[in-house]
Image (spheres, rainbow, N blue to C red):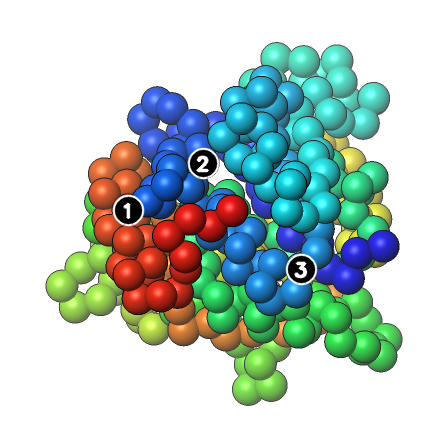
């Protein structure tokens, strides 16, 4: 059994990226992709297993671009997120579905290959070294609690914005004890001269650029799979007729569990600057950011 597992969600289609699989875009000096840096940071922090959640139709390309390389340096497994991978009683009803079911189902797909505390990340996000060190320490500590406790690595909103368009972030309210009080998935957040604004069909309103936000970096235990499994059935039962785009999303799931007082969520803080390829135009700035980190000695010229 591993001490702690890194689960990388890489099955997303990359809808905002404009063609190509954004998770597989090279950004490092030797063709490295963002995932290489995430895995390197996680291994340095102590994680000793990596699970890639991918689509079966991406497997060949995925292994050629990164999987085969990572298999040589750390215990590696694959989980496959397919739209058809749902409880049998719903299969006929949702046979027309083409969009992946979201991050909740992505994690559920891992239950056969994860048997240790695990950290969930997005494939196309660079989180920085501090986040992995904090998460590993949390996940490998002994804890005695009546309630299931999980963790989330929180980032500062202004450190997570794109220069090239709006982003969706889980805006978090953290209490004085460092616990998550609630999380609201918020779309249409844009950078502006004096911080950040939310723009949508109802207009525009300011948002505190120093707000804590979730970047889908969650520290969970294998017991969480049971919650996801029963919740997924409820979710599928409750979808309105004809809605083929509803998603089973981790922030929404965790927000609901908080409301029901079924879990406690410790918020770990990272002051590192996030970067990622949300839009095709983001790629040049990500390449420049990686180059600067390599030049500063944070990473070797060639990772693996």
Which circle, 2 or 3, is nearer the viewer?
Answer: 3
Q: Secondary structure at mark 2?
A: helix
Q: Secondary structure at mark 3?
A: loop
Q: Secondary structure at mark 1?
A: helix
In the rendered structure, which disc, 2 or 3, sits on the residue that comes first in sequence? Answer: 2
**Residue under numbered circle 2:** 23
Counting from the top left corner in percent of width and height, residue 67 is at: 59, 34
**Residue under numbered circle 1:** 287
Q: Nearer the viewer, residue 135 or 257?
A: 135
Counting from the top left corner in percent of width and height, residue 82 is at: 66, 24
Q: Nearer the viewer, residue 251 or 223?
A: 223
Which image quadrant: the N terminus? bottom right
In the rendered structure, which disc, 2 or 1, sits on the residue that comes first in sequence? Answer: 2
**Residue under numbered circle 3:** 47
In the rendered structure, which disc, 3 or 1, sits on the residue that comes first in sequence? Answer: 3
Residue 214 is at least partly visible in this image: yes
Q: Is 292 positioned to the left or the right of 246 in the image?
A: left
């Amino acid at each position: 059994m591993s001490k702690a597992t890194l689960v990388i969600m890489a099955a997303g289609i990359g809808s905002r990226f404009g063609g190509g699989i954004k998770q597989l875009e090279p950004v490092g000096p030797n063709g490295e992709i963002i995932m290489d840096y995430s895995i390197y940071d996680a291994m340095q922090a102590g994680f000793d297993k990596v699970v890639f959640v991918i689509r079966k139709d991406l497997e060949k390309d995925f292994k050629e671009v990164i999987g085969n390389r990572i298999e040589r340096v750390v215990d590696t497994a694959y989980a496959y997120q397919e739209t058809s991978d749902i409880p049998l009683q719903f299969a006929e009803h949702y046979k027309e579905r083409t969009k992946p079911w979201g991050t909740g189902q992505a994690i559920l797909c891992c239950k056969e290959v994860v048997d240790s505390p695990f950290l969930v990340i997005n494939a196309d996000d660079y989180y920085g070294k501090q986040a992995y060190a904090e998460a590993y320490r949390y996940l490998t500590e002994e804890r005695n609690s009546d309630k299931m406790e999980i963790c989330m690595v929180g980032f500062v909103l202004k450190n997570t914005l794109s220069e090239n368009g709006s982003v969706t972030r889980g805006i978090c309210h953290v209490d004085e004890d460092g616990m998550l009080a609630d999380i609201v998935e918020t779309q249409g957040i844009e950078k502006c001269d004096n911080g950040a604004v939310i723009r949508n069909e109802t207009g525009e309103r300011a948002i505190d650029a120093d707000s804590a936000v979730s970047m889908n970096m969650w520290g969970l235990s294998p017991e969480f799979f049971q919650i996801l499994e029963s919740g997924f059935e409820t979710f599928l039962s409750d979808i309105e007729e004809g809605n083929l785009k509803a998603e089973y999303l981790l922030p929404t799931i965790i927000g609901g569990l908080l409301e029901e007082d079924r879990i406690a969520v410790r918020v770990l803080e990272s002051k590192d600057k996030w970067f990622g390829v949300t839009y095709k135009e983001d790629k040049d700035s990500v390449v420049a950011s990686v180059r600067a980190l390599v030049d500063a000695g944070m990473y070797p010229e060639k990772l693996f």
